[in-house]
Amino acid sequence: MTLTDETSTIPAGGPTLEQVRRIVTELPGPRSAAILARKADAVASGVAHSMPVSVVAAGGGVVVDADGNSLIDLGSGIAVTSVGNAHPKVAAAVAAQAAQFTHTCFMVSPYESYVDVAEALNRLTPGDFAKKTALFNSGAEAVENAIKIARKHTGRQAVVAFDHGYHGRTNLTMALTAKAMPYKAGFGPFAPEIYRVPGSYPYRDGLTGAEAAKRAITLIEKQIGADSLAAVIIEPIQGEGGFIVPADGFLDAVVAWCRENGVVFIADEVQTGFARTGAMFASEIFRIEPDLITTAKGIAAGLPLAGVTGRAEIMDAAHAGGLGGTYGGNPIACAAALAAIDAFENDGLVERAQQIGTVLTERLRAIRENDPRLGDIRGHGAMIAVEFVDAETGAPDAALTGAVAKACVAEGVIILTCGTFGNVIRFLPPLSIGDDLLNEGIDVLAAALERA
Ligand SMILES: *Cc1c(COP(=O)(O)O)cnc(C)c1O
């Protein structure tokens, strides 16, 4: 199915989109180049982009640009379109809701779909206890609200975040985020009462989970004091920081300490949530039950929606009117979320994430057999990364990482880098991608590595 007239070359998005990598122009092609030139004139330069394209359609495992180039999608718009871009159930739910009503403000006139999303989150998040949810627009906003709730509940102010952590770009979440460039440099002053301690990075710190937890807890006790501490916030697998998987025993020791000391443990599952890691939530992998969980990204297939879900008695600490926002839990975003959650639960997407993880990990391990520059391969499910190092010294190799990513982009593979040291390539394919495209993406990466 195609649109008519001058747009007749534009294919419809969604799973019917032809699943091929096809490069018909240099990137950017002339149409994308013209739009990107207008972007340079019209859009603030702080809003950068990594792919030199202007998108017209996406679905399954591909993204198509204005010149007809079809790119393999190994990024899902940063772990957002996990169910697949323009998923038919999501597209239908969005269209139906848009024709009913587009907004009332849930704080003014409530509606059922918000309640449905809250019930789904209360049911799906780990922990067999009474839970409640509040909805917001972005991951950063969810994190801000989780901190507000934890402070109100405990009557304390300090918050602990971790080395390599990423929690967003608003003022409070910049303070929680570790990396200066590009997230914080020049944007201070930052919010007070935020403290940072080392977490667990087995590839680089060589500590067991218990040792890393002891190091963190000792610093917290000596430098902050449990009596002043409202919350500890951590990503169960750190995303922007480099897909760092903590050593076994780290997270449960931190959770146990929090519980003993009346500190709210917040798992930021904005990137890891919703089947991404081969579990509905990454907390399940580590067998932890966070007091509060923040969600966004994968929750609504690209519509802006975020949530804070957690123990009812903590969530209810905020006074009536203390939480909310004009758009939070917008009805169209809620409709999209309910369709996406249906797909996560009923279309085998948790299993599909596990299969994708197996394919990626086996292929990358095979490449590493003959290439010691692949220092570490890690992650869970469809959240896998490789850390590139100097084969002799083990030092992070950001130059190699950048060169490989650039080569993949030029050949039509959407690939994302991350890591505090800029030396990690991360794979976040949509769970709707086929094994053939996945393998082809890795073939392109392998060839780029050989040339680099
Ligand atoms: C992306 C991300 C955020 C911020 O989400 P936004 O929707 O960009 O505000 C927060 N925490 C984690 C772990 C993230 O990956």
Image (cartoon, rainbow, N blue to C red):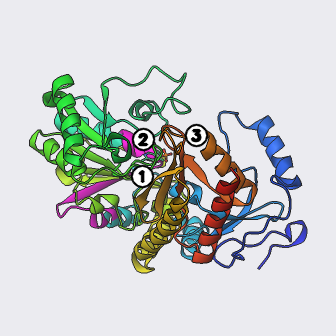
Q: Position of residue 266 (x, y in %)?
A: 28, 46
Of tags 2 and 3, which is closer to the observer?
3
Q: Image check: 143 left or right of 82?
A: left
Q: What residue type is labelled 2?
A: His
Q: Image check: 427 left or right of 110?
A: right
Residue sitting nearer the eye, 45 or 161: 161
Which residue bears the numbered disc 1?
A: 270
Which residue bears the numbered disc 2?
A: 167
Query: Does the CB distance between marks 1 and 2 fall below 8 Å?
Result: yes
Residue at image x 33%, y 62%? Answer: 121
Query: Does the CB distance between marks 3 and 1 fall below 8 Å?
Result: no
Q: How crowded is mark 3: few (under 14 residues within 10 Å), some or many (20 or more)?
A: many
Q: Position of residue 284 (x, y in %)?
A: 28, 62
Residue sitting nearer the eye, 58 or 61: 61
At numbered mark 2, what does the secondary structure look like: helix, strand or loop?
loop
Q: What residue type is labelled 3?
A: Ala
In the rendered structure, which disc, 1 or 2, sits on the residue that comes first in sequence?
Answer: 2
Which residue bears the numbered disc 3?
A: 398
Report if the beta carbon of the residue with label 1 is closer than 8 angstroms to ligand 1: yes
Residue at image x 75%, y 49%? Answer: 52
In the rendered structure, which disc, 2 or 3, sits on the residue that comes first in sequence?
Answer: 2
Residue 378 within the magenta-colored segment of the rendering: no
Labelled disc at residue 179:
none
Task: Locate residue 56: give its quadrant.
Answer: bottom right
Report if the beta carbon of the residue with label 2 is closer than 8 angstroms to ligand 1: yes
Residue at image x 47%, y 59%? Answer: 384
**What residue range appears in magenta?**
121-144
| Residue 437 visible here | yes
